[in-house]
Image (cartoon, rainbow, N blue to C red):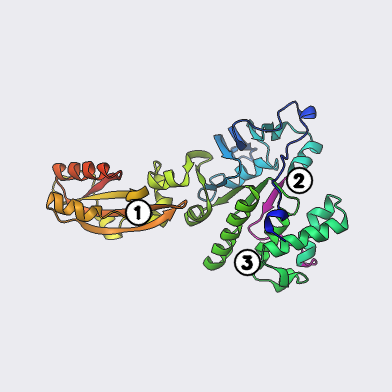
């Protein structure tokens, strides 16, 4: 069977407009909208209340793969749980296709959740059920006829590459195979939105790559909107179209993955980006870096190569035209979001006329430069 026919274009999952008084689609093209969403958890004992989310506002475009990245305790999981109504905001609203999730009564909320699939970090498979039966579970709970269940589960088993594991139990599967079962189960009801809660953090690097490739393929085949939370920037780099960086319950930066990687604004984002783009300073240089050039012999610059100029021989051109030595300290050329992207950290003479000239020449090639500091 053609995989495209197994996943017809998903239908809106919002509640009936006649009962909610809200439109069935969002004219902005956003599948999910966070509007000044705050969430506080009540204090326990003498402890103060905990603010997990603080006025979060951003959109998740329909059909996108959007990543939410942050350190432990930043509010990622709480934000994800507001999408399916497991956590309701203290203030603000989470809207799916124009419908305020927090305004729904229990019956309407259950209806909404049928169109939201969930992939868990630790798989959450039932040990007493086979691969087939674990995938079939949500269809059984929704009252789907048995013949339809069999056809649908067979399609999904084929899609996730487990045709030879149909009758196996979770204990007989590897971690990657268990997660494939979890993905198939999440897709069983043909959701419009797929939530991923650190789905690859328990997997080895090779299996992680395979699972991310599978999710990207599913997104391309079905148009399902994927929202994933992670603390690993390489996951964002490999699969996402857009990214939101969360810290202390606030979104401190968001945009297309390419834009955020090319010009990270917040310090937390810079730290995340540095871990995968080669723009981290060598430790011995970082230890000697100073903010002012007084007494320094070299300036340390970051040069970001993007678009058609990502592979241009700019360093050699700079060296020749300015008659200076340029030392490459670290860097790499890669692809971000399908577009070429390069990042180099270099050192050169710590003279203002030199750094200004480098910035001007780089800008003429569409490149971005930043003085990181100075070293003796």
Q: Is residue 129 left or right of residue 308?
A: right
The image shows residue 178, relative to residue 234, as above or below, that is below
The image shows residue 85, relative to residue 201, as above or below, that is above
Q: Which mark is residue 86?
A: none
The residue located at (34%, 52%) in the rendering is 310
Asked if one can make out residue 297 in the rendered structure from this viewpoint, the answer is no
Q: Which residue is mark 3?
A: 176
Q: Which residue is mark 2?
A: 114
Prevailing secondary structure class for the magenta stretch in the rendered image: loop
The residue located at (42%, 56%) in the rendering is 276
Give me the C-alpha separation between circle 3 and circle 1. Answer: 32 Å
Front residue of 49 and 270: 270
Asked if one can make out residue 97 in the rendered structure from this viewpoint, the answer is yes
Q: Which residue is mark 1?
A: 342
Q: Where is residue 79, by image quadrant?
A: top right
Give me the C-alpha separation between circle 2 and circle 3. Answer: 25 Å
Q: Where is residue 171, by image quadrant?
A: bottom right
Q: Is residue 341 left or right of residue 161?
A: left
Eye-nearest disc, 3 or 1: 1
Front residue of 272 and 188: 188
- Rendering coords of residue 133 (x, y %): 80, 63
Q: Which residues are magenta?
A: 115-130
- Rendering coords of residue 140 (x, y %): 84, 55
Per the image, label 1 sits on a secondary structure element best described as: strand
């Amino acid at each position: 069977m053609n995989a495209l026919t197994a996943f017809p274009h998903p239908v809106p999952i919002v509640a009936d407009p006649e009962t909610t008084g809200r439109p069935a689609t969002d004219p902005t093209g956003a599948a999910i909208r966070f509007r000044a969403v705050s969430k506080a958890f009540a204090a326990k004992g003498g402890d103060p209340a905990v603010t997990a989310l603080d006025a979060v506002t951003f959109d998740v475009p329909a059909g996108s793969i959007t990543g939410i990245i942050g350190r432990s305790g930043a509010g990622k999981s709480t934000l994800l749980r507001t999408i399916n109504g497991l956590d309701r905001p203290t203030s603000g609203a989470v809207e799916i296709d124009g419908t305020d999730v927090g305004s729904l009564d229990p019956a309407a909320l259950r209806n909404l959740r049928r169109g939201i699939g969930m992939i868990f970090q630790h798989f959450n498979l039932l040990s007493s059920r086979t691969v087939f039966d674990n995938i079939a579970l949500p269809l059984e709970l929704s009252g789907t006829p048995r013949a339809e269940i069999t056809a649908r589960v067979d399609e999904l088993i084929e899609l996730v590459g487990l045709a030879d594991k149909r009758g196996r139990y979770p204990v007989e599967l590897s971690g990657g195979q268990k997660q494939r079962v979890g993905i198939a189960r999440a897709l069983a009801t043909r959701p419009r939105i797929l939530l991923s809660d650190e789905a690859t953090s328990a997997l080895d690097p090779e299996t992680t790559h395979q699972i991310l490739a599978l999710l990207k393929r599913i997104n391309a085949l079905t148009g399902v909107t994927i929202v994933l939370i992670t603390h690993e920037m390489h996951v964002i780099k490999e699969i996402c179209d857009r990214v939101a960086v969360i810290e202390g319950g606030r979104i401190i930066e968001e945009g297309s993955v390419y834009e955020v990687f090319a010009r990270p604004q917040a310090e937390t984002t810079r730290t995340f980006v540095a871990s995968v783009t080669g723009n981290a300073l060598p430790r011995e240089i970082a230890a000697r870096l100073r903010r002012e050039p007084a007494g320094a012999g070299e300036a340390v610059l970051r040069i970001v190569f993007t678009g058609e100029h990502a592979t241009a021989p700019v360093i050699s051109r700079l060296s020749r035209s300015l008659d200076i030595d340029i030392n490459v300290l670290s860097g790499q050329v890669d692809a971000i979001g399908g577009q070429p992207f390069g990042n180099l950290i270099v050192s050169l003479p710590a003279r203002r006329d030199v750094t200004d000239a480098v910035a001007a020449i780089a800008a003429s090639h569409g490149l971005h430069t930043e003085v990181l500091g100075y070293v003796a």
